[in-house]
Amino acid sequence: QFQKPEDAIKYRKASFTVMAAHFGRIGAMANGKAPFDAKAAADNAALLAALAPLPGTAFGPGTDKGETRAKPEIWTESDKFKAGMTKMTEEINKLNAAAKTGDLAQIKAAFGGAAQTCKSCHDSYRKD
Ligand code: ASC
């Protein structure tokens, strides 16, 4: 799938970067820092749902070294790491469903759940 380990590392970082941009746009609305725009929320959430499965495909063998903050536990506890990635995609799918309703309260709740899954993997598996 990737020619070289550094290609996988670039790919996963790029996908997280794009996800953070779209997640942040919903977050700004959820946190009252930007006016609520139901269509923008739904568009951003739909993109996120498409993007969420991507980064997890790029943590294969040999991608633990190089320009990465990935901790070795990703590979030594790979079942737990994969479960975290699955949980993240599930919470993003819930956020997408919430965003389709156009109801800000539902979006806020789902945003919080999704953000928690980002944070928990960062706490366990990312060097600061
Ligand atoms: C974001 C972003 C993250 C998560 C995380 C949630 O907007 O870029 O990595 O939310 O900060 O705690």
Image (spheres, rainbow, N blue to C red):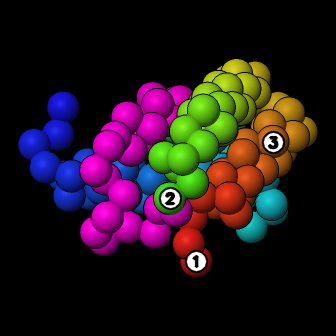
N-term-proximal mark, 1 vs 3: 3
Q: CA distance from mark 2 to mark 1?
A: 14 Å
* x, y percent for residue 12: 36, 50
The amino acid marked with disc number 1 is Asp
Q: Label 2: which residue?
A: 72
User: Residue 15 colored magenta?
Assistant: no
Residue tagged 1: 128
The magenta segment: 49-71
Q: CA distance from mark 2 to mark 3?
A: 26 Å
Residue at mark 2: C-beta within 8 A of ligand 1: no
Quadrant where the C terminus is found in the figure: bottom right
Q: Which residue is mark 3?
A: 113
Most foreground residue, 30 or 102: 30
Residue 11: x percent and y percent?
A: 28, 50
Q: In the rendered view of the protein, which quadrant contains the N terminus? A: top left
**Residue 94 image point, x, y percent:** 72, 26
Q: Which residue is rendered at x = 31% and y = 53% of the image? A: 63
Of the numbered discs in the image, which one, if any, rests on residue 81?
A: none
| 110 left or right, relative to 78 | right
- Residues 64 and 36: in front is 64
> Is residue 87 visible from the viewing direction of this image?
yes
46 lies left or right of 57: right
Return the disc, 2 or 3, that comes first in the chain's sequence: 2
